[in-house]
Amino acid sequence: MTKETYSFTATREEADQISEKIQEWCKKAKVDKKDLIHLRLAVEEGVAVLCEKYNETKPVTLRIVSKLESYAVVLEYEGECFNPLGESEESADEWTNVVMSQLGRNKAVHNYKANINTVRFSIPKKRYKAEIYMVLAMLLAILFGLLGNYIPESVREGITTYGLDLVSDMFMHLLGLFSGLIIFFSLMNGICGMGSVSDFSRVGRSIIGRYLSLSFLSGALLTFLATFFFKFEWGGAVNQNGVLDQVKSIILSIFPSNPVQPFLEGNMLQIIFLSVFIGVVMLALGDRVRSFKTVIIQGNELITKAVGIVCKVLPIFIFTSLLSIFWTLGFDVFLSLWKPIVVTVVLSFILTAVTLLYVSIRHRVSPFKLVRGLAKGTFVSFTTASSVVAYATIKEDLTKNLGLEEQFVDFTYPIGLNLYTAGYMLIFLTTMLSLAESTKTPVSVVWFILAGFYSVAFSIATPVVSGGALICVGVMLNSLKLPDNGLALAGPLIILLDFYCTASRNFTHALDVYLQAKKFGKVDDSVLQKKAS
């Protein structure tokens, strides 16, 4: 961690000097110019407010912090709780700050503790998308896979056994180290957020319940429909024990005999049960376990950061795993990838079309007007495969094109970033079904139930890091008894499907926010009418 500290008095002259220091530091750190401009304006505005509040006499400490990949500018000053950002003087709750950080919206977050005011300006680091490195890893694997024909078979076997497979196994072991913890903390962190949001009003409780019910109901329907597109090897367990015996067994396996066992065995059902059970009790206790909530939120940040570091070597894993598959099984194994892509696109399109028609008919709005109104945000989602990057554009579409109140969008849309998984869970589901078909893994009715449940649950619990979806795929492979090398096959699928499914999910999510805004009277219908004319 590097840190630079400057002490100054909140005067307009010194504010200009501090702004210059920030600019010099940001240029060295290669911060994006647009982010630099926003940062300087925000800091200058904050210092100007302090100047006016304290008549240019308030001592202020400026800290410029660089920690791993996180950059921040921090202002500290003693005295009564005062927020120079022009917002409520009450400090934001910690969960809200984390969500705003993920959205890239916490350019400034105010906190007050032990008579010290802290204003933290977070700075996004300029970096390339991880997907670029993953694609390069796949291309290199294909190139070396073709060159393998000119390498003696004994040499290929040695490289594969003691090189490629070794690296792949090391990554899978490292993944297993964090798999249970990332799911536990992600779900617990989401439950902390539910408690924070539900405290606001009935609107929060209604929206949370709606998102969760829509996610699981649509997940059940899509799982049922998707199974008709694949051919499976049915396991003998169905005929010997019967479906009811398997259901009984799976219900009993949900409940762990001790709190450590699920993490030692990597039993995802038990981990999910444990996190949900503790989370519900935590919500019931409310402020009496406020410190524990802080531990959960900070633990989630810690594990997410650790998983993000692990994901840095994900392109290396993809290269070694794909090359091992090419040299041992050949290129024909990838010919079946067309099926999950087509199935995902078709089912996701049907879900989107049904949602659009429902909104159109219920509120007597032309579907073409809705499509035009959300076109920009959907396009950004499709080209970036990121809900976070597209958030600002989608918010603009909802407020300026469809007439929703800005505060309502700020409140409802971030909640659904994790909880609203309708359609997006198809990425996990079709990947698992395709791998079960191609590897001839024995399946049963209960296996399909688990596949659908995991697809929705892991869509909610996916860590907000590059490669987070592949981390969840790795956990699902183990839970559904699929081969570990399926993660290499899943890599290309996840990358290709992520663009379309993110756009589809964000479009239907925006439509649902519009539905809820209509329900609570938060829509100015004249805005859409003016746009149409």
Image (spheres, rainbow, N blue to C red):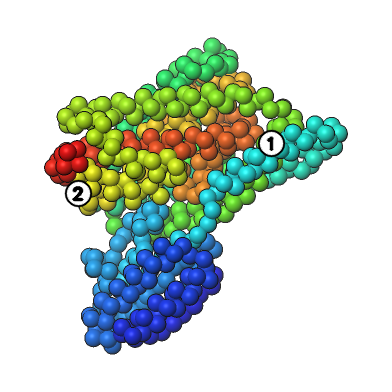
Identify the mark nearer the N-term, 1 or 2.
1
Residue 175 lies, in percent from the top left, at 59, 45
Q: What element carries label 2?
A: loop
Q: Residue at x 39, y 32 (%)?
A: 423
Q: Nearer the viewer, residue 19 or 216?
A: 19
Displayed quadrant of residue 373: top left
Give me the C-alpha separation between circle 1 and circle 2: 50 Å
The relative height of residue 248 versus residue 456 in the rendered view (above or below) is above
Give the x, y percent position of residue 48. Answer: 28, 78
Q: Which residue occupies the foreground of this view, 112 or 399? A: 399
Q: Position of residue 141 (x, y in %)?
A: 69, 39
**Relative height, residue 512 to residue 441 (above, below):** below
Q: From where the camera sits, is residue 408 visible?
A: no
> Which of the 4 image quarters holds residue 150?
top right
Q: Kindly give the residue lying farthest to the front in the view shown.
A: 533
The N terminus sits in image quarter = bottom right
| Whether residue 115 is situated above or below residue 393 in the rendered picture | below
**Residue at image x 50%, y 27%?**
341
Instruction: Look at the numbered disc 1 and give the secondary structure of its residue.
Output: helix
Few, some or many residues within 10 Å of mark 1 (<14, 14–19, 20+): some
Circle 2 residue:
405
Q: How many labels does the image show?
A: 2
Residue on which disc 1 sits? 142
In the image, residue 279 lies at what x, y percent?
Answer: 37, 46
